[in-house]
Amino acid sequence: MRPGGAASVVVANRAAAGLARALGAGAHAHVGEGPVDAVFRAIDAATNIKGRLTDFRIDAVTGGKDALGEVRISVEFEGAGYAGRGLSQDVVEAAARAYVRAVNVYTAGMVGARWDAQVAP
């Protein structure tokens, strides 16, 4: 254990592996206050865009052990709010999808593009 009693935990999941593959990058360590914070920090580093999470909600869309989770987030970029939504059986992956969606909406606004695409599960 580290001083202060907190244990170090390494979490590997499909979201982190998929992000590394999508970027054509090898494994990079990003530390956070948990796996969701760590993947958000990885996305911030990969996009060079820093957001501030203002709301995080998770709901089960289906039941059972293989339930589909829906994550809805609100993120602030340069003082303006953006929403994102992600779906997956892996809640960390769903959170990553939601965060990337918010980043995409933000960057589309930066270049004046319309952003009205449907959210893919």
Image (cartoon, rainbow, N blue to C red):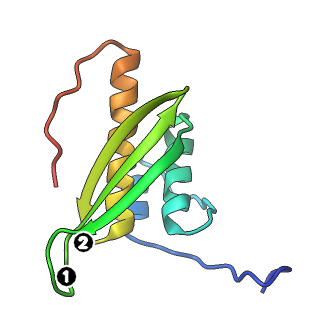
16 or 50: nearer the viewer: 50
Where residue 94 appears, as percent x and y from the top left, is: 31, 60
- The residue under label 1 is which amino acid type? Asp
Relative side of 117 to 26, left or right: left
Helix, strand or loop for disc 2: loop
Q: Are marks 2 and 1 in contact (CB under 8 Å)?
A: yes
Residue 46's place in the image compared with 18, above or below, is: above
In percent of the image, x 46 and y 41: which residue is there?
75
* Residue at 50% from the left image edge and 46% from the top image edge: 54
- Secondary structure beneath dot 1 equals loop
Q: Residue at x 56, y 69 (%)?
A: 34
- Location of residue 7 (image quadrant): bottom right
Q: Is residue 70 left or right of residue 10?
A: left
Asked which quadrant contains residue 50, the reply is: top right
Q: Which residue is mark 1?
A: 66
Disc 2 designates what residue?
Answer: 89
Residue 44: x and y in percent read 53, 43
Report the number of numbered marks.
2
> In the image as oriented, which residue stretches furthest toward the right?
3
- Identity of the amino acid at label 2? Gln
Q: Residues within 10 Å of mark 1 (few under 14, many from 20)?
A: few
Q: Is residue 103 in sight in this rendering?
A: yes
